[in-house]
Amino acid sequence: MKIIHFMFTAVIAAVFASCDAHMDFPDTAMKIGDIVCTDGAIVRYEDVDSLHKTPIAVVFYVNHNEDVEGNGYAVYLDDFATLAYSDSLGITHKTSADLMAYDGNSNTHAMYSTGTSPAASMVIDMWAYRQSAYIPLWHRCVCSLVSRSLSTR
């Protein structure tokens, strides 16, 4: 008899405690086409003006691989002047010489810390808090070059 009362009480509690006002929560995951702003915020295209953000780049790849550093890649909206990697060939920047490593961020910050790299200074100084930007290695540039040449045919 106790079991029947317990089951009846559980059913009544479930009926009264069930959700009757379902709320859809917005999807906040980063997506291809999202806008990267100068303060580092990533927002939807339609929200840039209403949030009074300054756009700087568009997300074109979202990283789902935990073995690779970073959340994804974005391409800048504006072209930049051609700048030298360094003011002098005699400067040691303490960058890695590994052409296949994904260490563009650490290499750019190493170049920036010497104060002799116009290219590193440009990509870091354009951000409000000097975050997130780096000079990509050659194999990261190949993708965008191939995509661009294919799209112009």
Image (spheres, grey):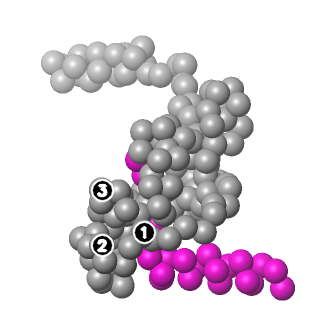
Q: Is residue 149 magenta?
A: yes
Which residue is the site of mark 1? Answer: 87
Numbered label tally = 3
Q: Name which residue type carries label 2.
A: Ile
Q: Which mark is residue 113?
A: 3
Which residue is the site of mark 2? Answer: 91
Which region of the structure is painted magenta? Answer: 131-153
* Image marks 1 and 3: residues in contact by CB distance under 8 Å: no
Q: Position of residue 134 (x, y in %)?
A: 44, 61
Q: Name which residue type carries label 3.
A: Ser
Q: Is residue 42 visible?
A: no
The answer to which of marks 2 and 3 sits earlier in the sequence is: 2
Residue 23: quadrant of the picture: top right
Please tell me whether residue 45 is drawn above or below residue 91 in the rendered image. above
Q: Is residue 130 visible?
A: yes
CA–CA distance in space, label 2 to label 1: 8 Å
Q: Secondary structure at mark 3?
A: helix
Q: Secondary structure at mark 2?
A: loop
Q: Name which residue type carries label 1.
A: Asp
In the image as oriented, which residue stretches furthest toward the left?
A: 2
* Image marks 2 and 1: residues in contact by CB distance under 8 Å: yes
| Picture residue at 81% right of the left edge, 80% below the top | 152
Please tell me whether residue 127 is drawn above or below residue 111 in the rendered image. above
The answer to which of marks 1 and 3 sits earlier in the sequence is: 1
| Picture residue at 55% right of the left edge, 67% below the top | 83
Q: Position of residue 32 (x, y in %)?
A: 60, 57
